Amino acid sequence: MSKVNPPNEKPANGNQQPKVGVYVCRCGGNISDVVSVEKVAEAAGQMPDVVVARQNTFMCSHPGQQMIVDDIAKLGLNRVVVAACSPRLHELTFRKTLVRAGLNAYLFEHANIREQVSWVSKSDPEGATAKATRLVGAAVAKVRLSRPLDPIKVDATRQVLIIGGGVSGLRCARDLSQSGFRVVLVEQSAALGGRLTELGRLYPVQVEAREVLHSLISEVSRDAAIQVLTSAEVTAVSGSIGNFSVAVRCAQQETTIHVGAIVLATGFDTYEPLPGEYGYAEFPEVITLPQFVRLLEKQGPSDGQLQRNGRPVKNVCLVHCVGSRQIEGIHQPGPDGRLHEYCSRFCCTAALQAANEIRARFPAVNVFDVYRDIRTYGRGHESYYEQASKQGVIFFRFLAEQLPQIRRADADGSALVVQVKDTLTWGEDLEIPADLVVLVTGAVPRDLSRLIDMLKLSRSPDGFLQEVHPKLRPVETAVSGVFLAGGCQAPMDVGESCTAASAAAARVSAALLKGYVELEPFAAVADPALCTGTGACIEVCQHQRAISLVDVMADGVTLRRAQVNPALCGGCGMCVPACPHGAIQVDGWRLEQFEAMVDAIAADY
Amino acid sequence: MSAGSSTGETVQQRLVFDALVVGGGIAGLQSAIELGDQGYKVLIVEKAPSIGGKMIGLSKVFPTLDCSSCICTPRMAAAAHHENVTIFTYSEVRRTERAGSRFQVEVVRKPRYVHEADCIGCRLCEYACPIHVEHEFEGNLGARKAIYVPFANAIPQLALVDLEHCVFCGLCEKACPTHAINFLQQPEEIAVEVGTIILATGYKMMSPERLKLYGGGRLRNVLTSLQVERLLAPHGPYGRVLRPSDGKAPSSIGYVQCAGSRDQSVGVSYCSRVCCMYAIKQAMLLSGSLPMVDITIYYMDIRAFGKGFEQFFQNAKAMGIEFVKAKVGRITEDENQNPVVRVEVMEQDGRVEERKHDMVVLSLGLLPGWDPSGVVPAEIAEDGFIRSADPLLAPARTTAEGIFVAGAAAGPKDIPDSIVEAGAAAMEAAIYLRRNGSSSNGDERAVNEQAAVVAQGRG
């Protein structure tokens, strides 16, 4: 890995007497309803080196940012503090503001007085104002000692690893290849296609899943820029955005590939009902929707009669929300101890599509649909519901508190009876005859624990992989360079998975397009004048090969001294207390800055 | 283009961009940023005087309850400050012609009657203006002047004159420190050449006037959901939640779901997809600002389908918000202007009841924001939204090659789905550009960078 540029020496605006501007955000009331932003700004105005302290309704808005730009020009500010929301939201916004005004981005400090103050101290406005003032004081104390820093630029590999060869992975591979990237697509099973290989016709256009897959797979297989590895799995990952090394085991061989980014397109599993859940695994007449779809597929078009195991089926009963929308105390957690509290999104429309198909192909078969809410939300989905009603599908609605029960029929006729307390008939207890009960199962998160450990990813409370923010960065994970595409993030249908996959491809493309990536400059720096070469820092270093001992010449003598490779350093700071001579510090977070912050927090205002 | 001069418009410029994004709401902004980040030059054309679309007017957004401004303003600023993104606000696309793989587009910049280069957004004109007009941004609950900056965090911060209400008193002209006001300003026609087009023209709300059984917009304490967004916004028209007729803080609020969705009697058979969640969100926020309030949501099905949505719905139930399965048949009002809803209480004994509330909110459905017919060669589907050519593999593709669609322009959609779709539309557009020989300057940079690396012998 070669560094594109050397670390910058201090530009002019770093050594001048600090002139700090402090900007306190009202956040349209989110902060100012609790914190007296006027008082905070007033107190900030009295802090050392503070030249101006103002407040504004939305500092992140254009007028708010412009205020900073104008003050930098007019008042010659060389340091800026914004007291607002979490830096996760807007630190980058304001760093860019400084850059536009000609200042180094790292002469900015962000004080969080929303998540850490106003949102958690609603009942104590005075205390909240005092706390906000102290946090601003600490930020001012820190920024006074800040030095200009430059992002670490690292060459980026224009090759991308996609894990998962289902529709999301295929779609993402195709988009990236057409954007000029090389792609390695790793699929753990023997064939591409994923979940789609199990589906029949797809809503909302009634196209066969295999036709959709065929076009996509042939496009991907023909593409020289896409290398497909089936029966393959990722066994180890190291490195960071721009330069990941990934060990892949394929056909008993382990190979290492180098990629700039990793896209997870690992999909979801379908819910497997617990033994006894709605009679599953207890009565052979109880099957899941995917099993029923395969049954319909196998059934010849001219049979005229719906059959299962050679026996005619006269009454089909669909039961919705099996393994979805689960509620503590009502539903049983699965083997993983997890309740699936979420809605699986696609199953209502998929179930109604199956219901309509039965009515269209086998008009003599009665279809009963037992549901909680019909969620045909998507474009064209509602027409499946309308069609079902028109075709005579009979609907019953139950509350989660009164789950339907399934038992053997006492008399001749249908094999099973589904008991429902039906809210559509004002709470009537009804018994539905059924030769076949179809459990409308949803999506569950896959067991990705090895990948999650390898890549240090996090899961959402629902067990699916977590994005950074559903609106700001919906296809990125908290690990820079690792992206999400499709059903590994949440239940999605085919169209939604393809959309998510393309969106992920767009983000990957933007990240790697320039051929280099910029990393935060918060890396450790060893001072050769203080270092004696003990190597204590190397022992505690959390990142492979980030620190090494190198020979340096000083006054004609060769000395062993610690040297940090900033591209590999994670900036964790483990080395700082380990050094017996205080010779190693993290740029942007130096000890003197911490001391100043602690003093400021403890000071009187 | 001689047609322009004959209508009194001046033809001045011819601009070239890689991409045109029609609509500067959250989907359009995100598409533009995504393309700009990939090194393509983008023009956003927005018909309103500010970018930000519907989202910038919302209070907080589900399911995270982030304040909407906190997500939307930085996106607006990011687009406005993006080196590859140009924005024309208060402008409209008038005509598009295909020229090979590219498009020739006529854009008209509407007159603000304020010279844009001179306006500094100081609002002195606004303070001087004596005319008060109902403010659209505040759901007509607040007032603005006849000359005004659209709203506090608008981009750009430029004043415009509402000629319909202006009395030409000239007070604004006297107040303006830069002499920016010009009542003789003409529409400006601009010829633009682009390589691809993304339609992000969003939605408009169902008009309450069309819902005759729900009072047809005449009942004062029957509000629209967007009005409630403004009531809940910390910088909204009243600064707190009040009902319009008498300023009373409501102690009982009813939500009428599917008001203009899933209702063939008003010609809208589809689900508007966001109303369940925004109603639940508003109910939660209202419970926060009016601790004693009772809230009832009358619904057909609760469609909490997105990530974290069902949990959000269950939290609302646990907070004591009442959910009643019923399609509201009619809304009337009593002598004190209290709205009365007529419902069948299905989950109990099926009796028909008239329930009185202090305030009722119509969870209005979403209608197409714009019909491209005759302007851009993209088709619309039966539902009036832009037709997707391949809803399975490429939902962002329209039936016209090189033209893509993002967000609610392709059907009702929440913010997270719109943003993801904007990314997908940008990806499609970028691939189309590449295939037709427009390389982004990102690529050029990369090529130069590689050349430099090779020159240094690093390969």
Image (cartoon, grey):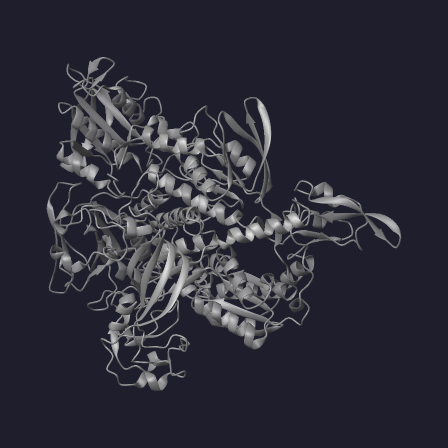
Side (left or right) of B121 relative to B129: right
Residue A267 seen: no
Q: Name the residue furthest right.
A: A556
Where residue A443 appears, as percent x and y from the top left, is 36, 33
Q: Name the residue furthest top.
A: A310
A218, A35: nearer the viewer: A218
A541, A278: nearer the viewer: A541
> What is the tally of numbered marks visible in this picture?
0
Instruction: Kindly identify the residue that appears in the image at 43 percent across and 31 percent down.
Output: A337
Where residue A212 appears, as percent x and y from the top left, is 33, 32
Task: Tell me the quadrant of the picture where the C terminus of chain A can be found.
Answer: bottom right
B438, B65: nearer the viewer: B438
In the picture shown, does residue A190 fall above or below A514? above
Instruction: Kindly identify the residue that appears in the image at 75 percent across and 53 percent down.
Output: A582
A25, A269: nearer the viewer: A269
Give the image quarter of residue A287.
top left
Side (left or right) of A442 relative to A418: right
Task: Tell me the quadrant of the picture where the N terminus of chain A can be found.
Answer: top right
Give the image quarter of residue A408.
top left
Residue A239 seen: yes
Instruction: Kindly identify the residue that appears in the image at 57 percent across and 21 percent down.
Output: A252
In the picture shown, does residue A345 fall above or below A288? below
In the picture shown, does residue A184 fall above or below B145? above
Where residue A8 appears, as percent x and y from the top left, is 67, 59
Where residue B293 appears, as percent x and y from the top left, is 27, 57
